[in-house]
Image: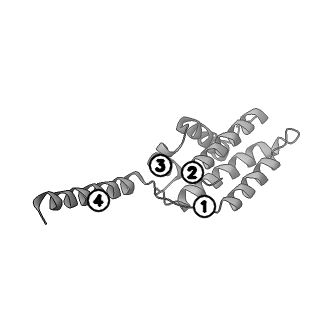
């Protein structure tokens, strides 16, 4: 083997290692969800939301938030809280700010006793969660 071939092989190995490290650092592993299961669960959540029943507004937001958190955990996102996990993999969402808004609404529902949620807010939050789950490949 001449020096040019050896140099070429070493260069290819270095590039392969760099690509592997980049994949590990960005967390974009090829995780495959059970899409059918996630679609069915999200559809059930969407079907619970009823304009005629204000009690469904808050519960559907909480359930959708839990489903997104489950997907993030399942794909290997690390963090003590959902907020920590969002910080880690936020680049995977087409609209991270919207996901944060929906999650903050969920937190307000969970922690504030006097919060009122409208049908429009609940419907918008569900659409945000749906897009987030699509972004992850869960639905």
Residue depicted at 70% across the width and 42% down the height: 126
Tell me where residue 62 appears, x and y as whole percent. 68, 49
Depth check, mark 4 against mark 2: the one in front is: 4
Residue 41, quarter of the rendered image: bottom right
Secondary structure at badge 4 equals helix
Depth check, mark 1 against mark 3: the one in front is: 1
Identify the mark at residue 17; answer none if there is no mark: 4
Considering only order in the chain, which callout, 1 or 2, is on the residue closer to the N terminus?
1
58 relative position to 133: left or right: right
Taking the view exactly as shown, the residue that stands out farthest to the front is 1
Considering only order in the chain, which callout, 2 or 4, is on the residue closer to the N terminus?
4
Identify the mark at residue 89; answer none if there is no mark: 3
Identify the mark at residue 33; answer none if there is no mark: 1
Identify the mark at residue 136; answer none if there is no mark: 2
Residue depicted at 61% across the width and 52% down the height: 68
User: Would you say the residues marked 2 and 1 are in contact, meaning their CB atoms lie under 8 Å apart?
Assistant: yes
**What is the distance, in whole Å, between disc 3 and disc 2 at their CAs?**
10 Å
**What is the distance, in whole Å, between disc 1 and disc 3 at their CAs?**
16 Å
Taking the view exactly as shown, the residue that stands out farthest to the left is 3
User: Would you say the residues marked 3 and 2 are in contact, meaning their CB atoms lie under 8 Å apart?
Assistant: no
């Amino acid at each position: 083997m001449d020096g040019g071939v050896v140099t070429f092989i070493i260069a290819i190995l270095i590039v392969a290692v760099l690509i592997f490290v980049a994949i590990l650092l960005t967390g974009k592993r090829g995780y495959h969800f059970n899409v059918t299961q996630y679609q069915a669960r999200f559809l059930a959540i969407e079907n619970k939301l009823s304009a005629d029943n204000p009690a469904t507004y808050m519960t559907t937001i909480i359930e959708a938030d839990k489903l997104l958190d489950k997907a993030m955990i399942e794909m290997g996102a690390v963090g003590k809280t959902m907020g920590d996990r969002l910080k880690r993999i936020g680049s995977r969402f087409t609209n991270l700010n919207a996901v944060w808004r929906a999650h903050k609404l969920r937190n307000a529902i969970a922690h504030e006793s006097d919060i009122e949620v409208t049908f429009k807010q609940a419907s918008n939050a569900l659409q945000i969660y749906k897009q987030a789950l699509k972004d992850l490949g869960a639905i």
